[in-house]
Image: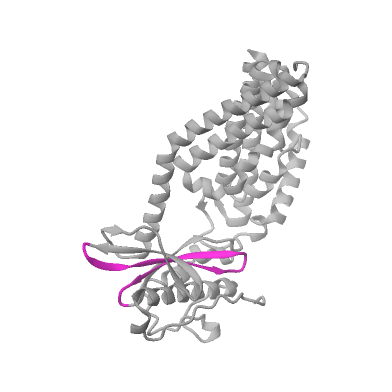
């Protein structure tokens, strides 16, 4: 079985093992870096394409600051024309952070939304990615006509059954994205800009 | 030949890591929310198990006794990181679903357990068979557990929904269901399969 231990062979074997393993991993990193980057870029592009009308080019990930919080966003263009902004908006949901990519066209309408990551309860809040009634209402959502709170709170957002907290958080994410959009468009030219608030939702429904 | 075949079937039934040895419970309970997740987690562990078993059986004779655990862990961690790179590159969606549980394979007691209990006393080929057997046992157990939880919890099989958009019994997708299913499957496994 194992060799008898002395200082020399312990240092030698452990050192050599580490050296060899690092070399293998270094090589593997170089080989897989390109596909990993490509996969990440493709995922982002797919998310942008999901929330905005067809566009030709998307900008690099940039940040816009709204009331002390950084919102990552992508600018999508067709030629010189602005197609819209895809803004990543993170709020506190029921089970943790909920990150929603919100596509907003220059006429300040929500084109569509897509969940990037969430930790909501499976079968309840997690339905914010699948519930057809909830998901479809965001396509073409016009915040100047509809009120961005759930129906229970007097707004126009259809909540997911039994998941009011998630639905509220989702509406808040869209609202914050709109505030970020307003900042991007120049805060002065804005009507009805809403202050983003990241108050934590409290109380169970 | 029959000896190596027996090593594989032992891993599946007699030394089944989930239902008999009760090893690696953390990924077992956490990742089996659906059959496909269980299957992926099982295959990821199988990959690491076979390669680390082979590598460790090859280097075991020259590893001094006092540092054998650190050496084994470095070897296992290397294969896990390798797997992580590959999954990120070629199956990014699955990598995201399994998330934290891929790096945690390093401390999965099945992997180090087989290195300690088997690989460092046997040849490369036999260790590979043992890794394959135990890995397949783990994969099958996780797939079955995932399948049962998916059927009861979401009413679907491998993502194919058969109850038409209605909810299943949600508890089975969450933690309590994991314990319940695991417990009952363990009973059934030990009562009927292990006897023979």
Inspect the magenta stretch and tell me whether residue A105 lies in it: yes
Q: Residue at x 55, y 63 (%)?
A: A126
- Furthest residue in direction left, as rendered: A79
Q: Main secondary structure of the magenta part?
A: strand
- Left or right: where B156 falls relative to A142: right
Is the residue A55 above or below the residue A175 in the image?
Answer: above
Q: Position of residue A23 (x, y in %)?
A: 53, 28
Q: Residue at x 36, y 55 (%)?
A: A45
Q: Nearer the viewer, residue A110 or A136?
A: A110
Q: Position of residue A174 (x, y in %)?
A: 46, 73
Residue A123 % position (x, y): 58, 62
Q: Quadrant of residue B58?
A: top right
Residue B17 lies left or right of residue A159; in this view the side is right
Q: Nearer the viewer, residue B58 or A125?
A: B58
Horizontal side, residue B117 vs residue A71: left or right: right
Q: Residue at x 44, y 72 (%)?
A: A177
The color scheme shown is one colour
Which portion, as a residue range, is magenta? A79-107
């Amino acid at each position: 079985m194992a060799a008898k231990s002395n200082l020399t062979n312990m240092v030698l074997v452990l050192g050599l093992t580490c050296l060899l393993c690092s070399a293998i991993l270094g090589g593997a990193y170089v080989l897989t870096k390109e596909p990993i980057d490509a996969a990440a870029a493709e995922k982002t592009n797919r998310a942008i394409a999901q929330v905005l009308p067809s566009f030709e080019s998307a900008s690099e990930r940039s940040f816009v600051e709204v009331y002390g919080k950084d919102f990552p966003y992508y600018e999508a263009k067709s030629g010189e024309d602005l197609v819209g902004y895809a803004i990543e908006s993170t709020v506190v949901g029921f089970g943790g952070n909920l990150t929603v990519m919100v596509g907003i066209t220059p006429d300040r309408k929500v084109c569509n939304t897509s969940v990037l990551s969430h930790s909501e309860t499976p079968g309840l809040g997690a339905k914010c990615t699948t519930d057809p009634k909830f998901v479809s209402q965001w396509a073409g959502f016009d915040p100047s006509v509809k009120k961005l709170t759930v129906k229970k709170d007097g707004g126009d957002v259809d909540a997911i059954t039994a998941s009011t907290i998630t639905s509220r958080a989702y509406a808040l994410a869209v609202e914050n994205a709109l505030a970020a959009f307003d900042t991007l468009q120049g805060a002065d030219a804005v009507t009805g800009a809403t202050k983003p608030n990241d108050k934590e939702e409290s109380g169970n429904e | 030949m029959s000896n190596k075949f027996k090593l594989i079937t032992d891993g599946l039934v007699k030394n089944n890591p989930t239902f008999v040895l009760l090893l690696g419970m953390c990924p077992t309970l956490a990742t089996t929310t659906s059959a496909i997740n269980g299957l992926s987690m099982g295959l990821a562990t199988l990959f690491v198990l076979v390669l680390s078993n082979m590598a460790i059986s090859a280097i075991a004779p020259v590893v001094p006794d006092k540092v054998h655990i650190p050496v084994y862990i470095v070897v296992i961690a290397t294969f896990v990181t390798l797997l992580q790179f590959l999954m990120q590159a070629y199956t990014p969606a699955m990598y995201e679903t399994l998330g934290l549980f891929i790096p945690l394979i390093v401390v999965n007691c099945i992997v180090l357990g087989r290195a300690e209990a088997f690989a460092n006393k046997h040849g490369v080929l036999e260790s590979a068979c043992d890794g394959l057997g135990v890995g397949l046992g783990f994969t099958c157990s996780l797939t079955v557990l995932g399948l049962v939880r998916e059927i009861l919890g979401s009413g679907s099989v491998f993502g194919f929904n058969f109850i038409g958009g209605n909810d299943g019994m949600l508890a089975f997708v969450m933690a309590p269901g994991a314990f319940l299913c695991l417990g009952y499957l363990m009973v059934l496994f030990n009562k009927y399969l292990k006897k023979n």
